[in-house]
């Protein structure tokens, strides 16, 4: 089985905090798919986006899991924000 490579740096910003995570290509694809869609924008190529609080917590709880989930819960509280911005850092 191939080792998961986390080669995408993503900043998550909400409630006055910015936290950086390294995500694999598969995790980035799930993040893009969970984002709020804008008409006419190809979701597979997005470099930034917005997520509702329930979407981002479901993403980390059920799809990403592991230590990233624990770190995310430590940094962000569900009731502190309504939407979160994410940005793919080059």
Image: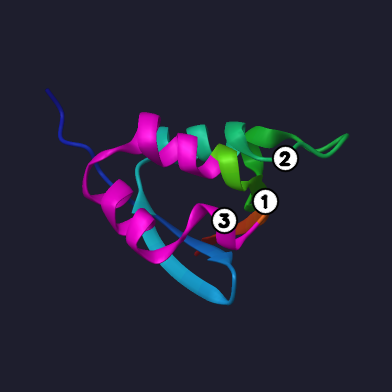
- In the displayed structure, would residue 69 be above or below residue 63? below
Marks 3 & 1, CB-CB < 8 Å contact: no
Left or right of 73? Residue 86 is: right
Q: Which SS class for mark 3?
A: helix
Q: Residue at x 59, y 70 (%)?
A: 15
Between residue 23 and residue 83, name the one nearer to us: 83
Distance from Cα at disc 1 to Cα at disc 2: 7 Å
Q: Earlier in the sequence, mark 3 or mark 1?
A: 1
- Compared with 9, 34 (above or below) is above
Identify the residue at horizontal 57%, vertical 38% (top origin). 55
Q: How many marks?
A: 3
Quadrant in which the N terminus appears = top left
Q: Residues within 10 Å of mark 1 (few under 14, many from 20)?
A: some
Residues at marks 3 and 1, CA–CA distance in whole angstroms: 20 Å
What residue is rendered at 62% in x and 56% in y?
84
Segment tinted magenta in the rendering? 56-81
Q: Position of residue 2 (x, y in %)?
A: 15, 28
Q: Quadrant of residue 32?
A: top right
- Marks 2/3: CA distance? 19 Å
Q: Which residue is mark 3?
A: 79
Give the residue number, with chain letter if any, for mark 1: 49
* Residue at 34%, 51% in the rendered image: 7
Q: Earlier in the sequence, mark 1 or mark 2?
A: 2
Where is mark 2, residue-wise? 36
Badge 1 vs badge 2, beta-carbon distance below 8 Å: yes
């Amino acid at each position: 089985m191939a080792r998961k490579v986390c080669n995408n740096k993503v900043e998550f910003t909400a409630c006055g905090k910015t936290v950086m995570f390294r995500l694999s290509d598969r995790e980035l694809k799930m993040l893009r798919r969970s984002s709020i869609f804008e008409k006419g924008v190809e979701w597979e190529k997005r470099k930034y986006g917005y997520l509702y609080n329930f979407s981002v917590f479901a993403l980390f709880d059920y799809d990403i899991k592991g230590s990233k989930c624990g770190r995310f819960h430590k940094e962000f509280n569900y009731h502190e924000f309504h939407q979160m911005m994410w940005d793919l850092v080059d």
